[in-house]
Amino acid sequence: MKPENQIPNDQNPGGQVEPDVIPVVLADSQGIYSIGIRKVLALEPDIRLIAEVASLEELRIALQQHSINVVLVEGELLIEAPGSIQELQEISPGIKLIVEAASINKEKTVELYRRGIRGIISRSISPDLLVKCIRRINSGEAWIDNQALNWVISAYRSQGAEVRNPRPNHHLSLKETVIITCITQGMRNKQIAFQLGTTEQVIKNYLRKIYDKLGVTDRLELAIHSVQKKIVQADAVEIAISHGARQKA
């Protein structure tokens, strides 16, 4: 990776990131846009921009060199290389990809979500929504607007698509089923924990087990899977996740 793509030492001393700080890499070929993102993130004490890169090759190197939670990546870089999402996830398992797009259509939107990206944002997104998006995606949520949500649900219904790596035997416990129902009602972990008389950490632990059992990776896929397998009613899921998407605006 070129030295000029690294964040200055006074912003990233020793390349170390404090606990509870979200490490972010920005991958964008447009330098002027990158400057704006850098200024926005520099104001947030819980977000640290670890590196700026201008190509997929530089992004691969950055992921090999740093421990990264979130990647902000220019949409054109991924669209031009369809297999790059899986490759990046293999280099750094657990990274969460946010795609920046000037414009995007239904086909590309559905394909990006299917391949594992966690959110698509406009290149004209406001600073406060950008920061909110990074925090929510880092916490394990998906970021999706109403139009993209309708596209994804429509695609899964019309094509009968299965979520990645479905597992045949669910064997959901009663409590896991209750948690899934709460998720499809748009409830956050804190609300679910309060309703069940437990802690957020316990709910997170249950969700990891649920994701593993059903072969899904986040709340959005869980909701869609619930429609397909009739774990909950389709109409209820659509209303719940549509409501959740509107809350992000």
Image (cartoon, grey):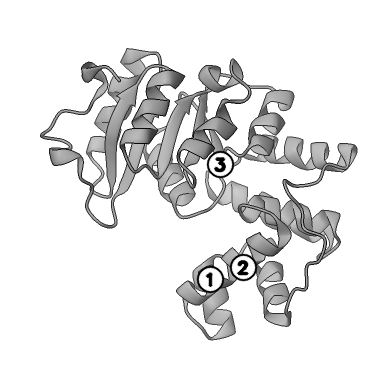
Q: Is residue 87 left or right of residue 48?
A: right
> Which percent across, then down, holds residue 172?
75, 73
Say which of marks 3 and 1 sits in front: 1
Q: Earlier in the sequence, mark 3 or mark 2?
A: 3
Question: Which residue position is annotated with label 3?
Answer: 118
| Mark 3: few/some/many CA within 10 Å (<14, 14-19, 20+) | many
Identity of the amino acid at label 2?
A: Lys
Q: Three-letter amino acid code at disc 3?
A: Arg
> x%, y% of residue 209?
62, 68
Q: Callout 2: few (<14), some (14-19), or many (20+) C-alpha neighbours within 10 Å?
A: some
Q: Are marks 2 and 1 in contact (CB under 8 Å)?
A: yes
Q: Which residue is mark 1?
A: 205
Q: Is residue 238 visible?
A: no
Few, some or many residues within 10 Å of mark 1 (<14, 14–19, 20+): few
Mark pair 3, 1: CA separation: 20 Å
Q: Residue 57 versus residue 236: which sits nearer the camera?
A: 57
What SS does tag 1 mark?
helix
Circle 2 residue:
209
- Tally the numbered discs: 3
